[in-house]
Amino acid sequence: KKNRPYLLIGFGRWGTADRFLGIPAKWSDINGAKTIIETTLEGFSIDFSQGAHFFHNIVSANIGYFHIKHKSEQHKIDWDWINKQKSKTDLEFVRHIELKNPLTVRIDAQKREGIILKPEK
């Protein structure tokens, strides 16, 4: 509503038609995101969206994209930090936080590497 950039983190595939594979969102629901993360959970590990029509929309719109496996030693989501942030909205399957200062997202698509830096205090 505020037309601010946002990051989405979801378990499974974004935009899937099958709710058992992830988040059944329409492109119009999430095309305002600046970065999208698909991740897995223990016992819920599916193939990521890399060949899907939805993924091509992400790439075409120049939206940053990460996929992070839950047990990866190299790639991690700082859930402790996220969980310490104040919620704007808490629903059964959605948690919305708003940061005072922006995250910094750096992606090198050629190297298939990226980092998201927490805001400085």
Image (cartoon, rainbow, N blue to C red):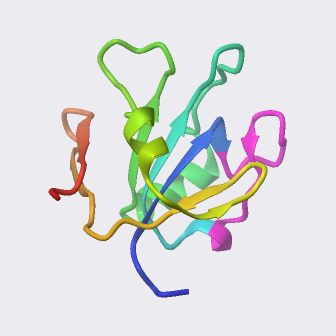
**Residue drawn at point x = 76 percent, y = 34 percent:** 21
Q: Is residue 115 left or right of residue 85?
A: left
Q: Main secondary structure of the magenta part?
A: loop
Residue 40 left/right relative to 36: right
Residue 50 is at least partly visible in this image: no
Whether the magenta-drawn stretch holds residue 20 is answered as yes
Q: Is residue 24 visible?
A: yes
The residue that appears at 39% across and 73% down in the rendered structure is 5
Looking at the image, the residue that sits furthest to the left is: 120
Q: Which residues are magenta?
A: 14-29
Q: Residue at x 42, y 56 (%)?
A: 59
Residue 26 drawn at (x, y percent): 72, 64
Residue 57 sits above or below residue 83 on the image: below
So how many labels did they put on this image?
0
Residue 49: percent from the left, percent from the top? 58, 39
Give the quarter of the figure containing the N terminus. Answer: bottom right
**Is the residue 1 above or below the residue 7 in the image?**
below
